[in-house]
Amino acid sequence: STMARRLGFTAGRRHAPIKGMFFALIATVDGFSSVHLVSRERQRQLNSNTRQSTRRYSQHATITDSIRTAFEEDQTDGILKLSDLHSKTDVETLIEATLDAVNENSGPVASVLNGFIGACTLMEDESAAATRACELLEAFEELEEEKEISPDIVTYSLAYNVISRDPDSVGLANVALERAQKMSKKVAGTKRRKALAASRRKKVSESCKSVESDLKELLGEDFEVLHESDDAFVINKPSGISCFHKKTTTAGKVKKGKKSQKPSDISLEAALSLCGVPLSTLNPEGLGLVHRLDRGTSGCMVLAKTDQAHASLLSEFFLRKCEKQYTTIVAPAPLSSTPDSGSIDTPVDGRPARSEYHIMKRYGTTAALVNFRTFTGRKHQVRVHAASSDLASPVLNDDLYSRKDRTPDLPDDIIKSDDSKSRFLLHASTLSIPRYEINCQAPLPNWWKPVLESIQNASSDD
């Protein structure tokens, strides 16, 4: 009305053009108001979007930092500890944060994502865990096309382990296992694929125990079957025996029809196959081998009979649900100032590694009998930790990690054996895998007895 009076419109006048002008003006004013209101609403929406983007960026940065720190400090073990973050973060965000955390390096990306798939086993709801594992696996496989970062046999084994626990997802679990089998064939190469195919066609024995005497003849008197089920078995591997040969030499080759003739360098895999022991085919390097022991190391080893058991056992090792202890003779003995028990965190090959040790017996300054418990599964971990500055006492007869500043005061021929150079005093004494009701203890090798007697005599002369 104020605007109308300014234009000369007063009550009682009936001037149609002016009235029309008035309503047109009111409509124009309302239009300006509407535009202004829309503009304000749009600005509020923009501000809201900005705040949401800021929150998402902050959340992404926090998740990225958590993944980076966990992986740098503790590798996949650190990722497994991020269970809360894993369960509360959508898969897309986890993938993006992982790529940023490790700068899209293929190896670390695979390790982190394997850790997240493995962490699904910590979820109480088996159905939700299976769904989560499938989502992570699908996202991981998409990276193969986008970033050329591929899942590996461990990835599919972990996925199978999680998904198979849900009774309603058995079909999906079998798909994951089939992909692991397919990848194993791809990695193996032509020659190895032929060997895998031959092993599947070969007639197998009912058990490893039933051919134990034959295996003793091939591998030595220390060989023993410690535990066996329908899915897996645990053996006492003799020292000096290789788990498998990448290239079969004449010394390691078994001639057809001449089973009784023992090759001078037969591998564990070759002996088991020769005797018809059923072995899984997931490991492209060695049938049945879920883990390894060095040629010179003796003791507990678990092997899988089926691919299903192989995938599950591999997951148990990945998730650190297997307890391993080792007995070793180190020489010279640790310094008197060294505590009888302690932990060692010296990295192995640039990766975090942790062991606990306990000195069971000292033989003067000559040598010591030491027990190790490993919490990580690094290659040569006990050998590296024994020789590290914490103990400074290498495994006896281990030339690879001997120390020039501390040499044992023992005869060079203390090990009375033709293959003494392929043996050292390290023994995987116990292995425990609760899920498979495995709790095994392997007796010390027979050839250790004269060595210990020589050490005892040498220490008496100190």
Image: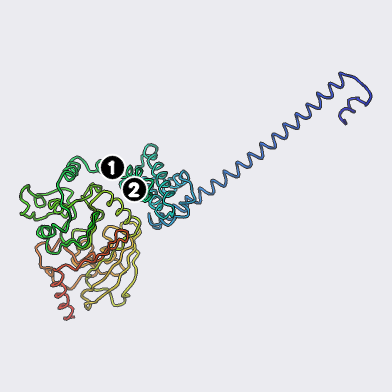
Which mark is drawn over residue 160? 2
Return the x and y of residue 279 as percentages of the image width and height: 20, 51
What quarter of the picture does the C terminus occupy?
A: bottom left
Q: Secondary structure at mark 2?
A: helix
Discs 2/1, front: 2
Return the x and y of residue 438 as percentages of the image width and height: 27, 62
Q: Does 346 sit left or right of 230 as displayed?
A: right
Q: Nearer the viewer, residue 250 or 436?
A: 436
Colour scheme of the rendered structure: rainbow
Q: Identify the residue at image location x=18%, y=58%.
A: 295
Q: Does 30 sit left or right of 125 as displayed?
A: right
Q: Which kind of residue does numbered mark 2 sit on?
A: Tyr
Q: Residues within 10 Å of mark 1 (few under 14, many from 20)?
A: some
Q: Which kind of residue does numbered mark 1 sit on?
A: Met
Q: Nearer the viewer, residue 227 or 6?
A: 227
Residue 448: quadrant of the picture: bottom left
What quarter of the picture does the N terminus occupy?
A: top right
Q: Secondary structure at mark 1?
A: helix
Q: Badge 1 is on which residue?
A: 183
Residue lying at the far right in this picture: please name it: 12
Label 2 or label 1, whichever comes before in sequence order: 2
Return the x and y of residue 322 as percentages of the image width and height: 31, 60
Task: Please say if 253 is above or below 225.
Answer: above
Q: Is residue 337 visible?
A: yes
Instruction: Calculate the distance from the C-alpha at mark 2 to the C-alpha at mark 1.
Output: 14 Å
Residue 263: quadrant of the picture: bottom left
